[in-house]
Amino acid sequence: MAQDTLTITDNRTNLTYSFPIEKETVRAMDFRQIKTGPEDFGLMTYDPAFMNTASCRSSITFIDGERGILRYRGYPIEVLAEHCSFLEVAYLIVFGDLPNEVELKNWTNEITHHTMLHETTKKFMEGFRYDAHPMAMLVSTVAALSTVYPEARDIHDTNNRLRQIKRLIGKMPSIAAMSYRHSLGFPYVYPDNDLNYAENFMNMLWKMVEPKYVANPVLARALDILFILHADHEQNCSANVARSVGSAHADPYLTTAAAAAALSGPLHGGANEEVLKMLDEIGSKDNVPAYVKKVKDGHGKLMGFGHRVYKNYDPRAKIIKWTAEQVFQVTGRNPKLDVALELERIALEDDYFIKRKLYPNVDFYSGIIYQAMSFKPEMFTVLFAIPRTVGWLAQWQEMLTDSEQKIARPRQIYTGHDVREFLPMEKRASAPAAAD
Ligand code: CMC
């Protein structure tokens, strides 16, 4: 009769071991029983870049990369993007269920009342150089919030944790907008509590001398949808950083700053900025075949293509394409869209990309929308960080309340020298150069 176990024979000893299989997974710690003798440490598993290692149990986000499925707390991303506001989805991700009317009203009210930044934080931001990258400003300022809210260190108190989660969700757009205005040399704009989350962000970005900022509803909704699409993505690089830093019991501001730092990398959230640079470099549709050939010849990558988990079309990219059409009706068509569409068409017909299952990811089209909305490319990853804060904090909270989790501490396979004889300085000149 079939059993949910894995049987392994160690050919060094001829001993056989049986390990349980649960949810298609075996526990790496079971392998430590496999030893050649009592002094042996036991077998480890080697998995650089976590290619095949589950680091946690999570009930937040489900991805089926082969079928192109993404769900938050069981709800398909397409349904949430069509019917919900970003704060409604944020509530779902943080608490596990969609809010009822009263819960959403209270939640929205609380987030809205956490949008102000302390004046010292404003002064802190004024200290950045005029040409500082907005993402570097965001990472540093989020870390600096730790100095404003020292009580956040009490990470074991559920209510305290929740207060910091609300603060961070409320303050991210304010920090993002301040970093944008700083890079333009414009004065900061304070939040307007009459506006919804996306509208208020637009207010803080673009209000000039008018007494009241009125957001274009199509653009505000597009931004809200983009926020929904970026809110969480299970154990991606930055979520893994949030869990890892949080596992040492760092406070949520420092944890979020660390996660945002990971997001800034061009292989992760920084890819949206790189896509725009790539489209600029390609210039026109006619140059696409030559660019694709260059990539296939090993010179660079198609930015915004490929994903560790999706081996089918990224469902978020589909929704973004649709959203782009809505935005372009207001802003006019971004000519880069034609280059992007041609790039996608040619790549998806090409054996190199088909064989490697490389499809456009979320970053491929988002930058084109952001640019049409008049954001500078340096802001694109900042726009990703605002909603992803919800995911990081939900992952952080889930990790802290999981009794199986401990401080994250991988093992290594040591490849350095065995014990060496110490040479005093006067004898080292004639010694051969060190290996590393
Ligand atoms: N263009 C050309 N070739 C690619 C690309 C690409 N964008 N992505 C992967 N490949 C090739 C890669 O060279 C390798 O080929 P080979 O088997 O011949 O060595 C093969 O496809 C497998 O790639 P990999 O690097 O082993 O895959 P990975 O899972 O380690 O990397 C990735 C995933 C997203 C880092 C990678 O696809 C990539 O660098 N893409 C471009 C950057 C990008 O768009 N990042 C955003 C990811 S989605 C949003 C997010 O996470 O923030």
Image (tube, rainbow, N blue to C red):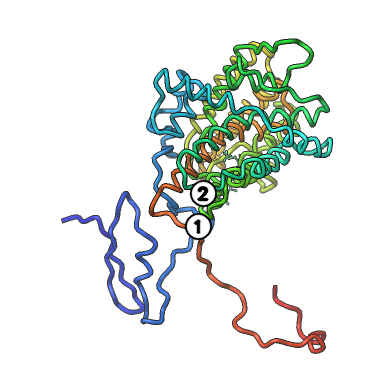
Residue denoted by label 2: 243
User: Tag 1, which secondary structure?
Assistant: loop
Question: For the point 70% across and 40% down, which residue is it?
Answer: 141
Residue at the limit of the structure toward the front, as seen here: 151
* Residue nearer the viewer, 381 or 319: 381
Residue 322 place in picture, x, y as percent? 55, 19
**Tag 2: amino acid:** Arg
The residue that mark 1 highlights is 408
Q: What secondary structure is found at the residue carrying circle 2?
A: helix
Coordinates of residue 328 in the picture (x, y in percent): 64, 15
Does residue 77 sit above or below 7 in this rendering? above
Q: Is residue 32 above or below residue 1?
A: below
Residue 92, position as x, y percentages in the image:
43, 29
For residue 31, say whether it is visible.
yes
Residue drawn 42% across the image and 38% down it: 60
Front in this rendered view, residue 250 or 363: 250
**How far, Cα to Cα, is label 2 from label 1?**
8 Å
Would residue 246 appear left or right of 178 to someone viewing this image?
Answer: left
Structural crowding at the residue carrying mark 1, measured as other residues with C-alpha within 10 Å and reported as few (<14), some (14–19) or many (≥20): some
Query: Ligand 1 quadrant?
Result: top right
Q: Which mark is residue 291?
A: none
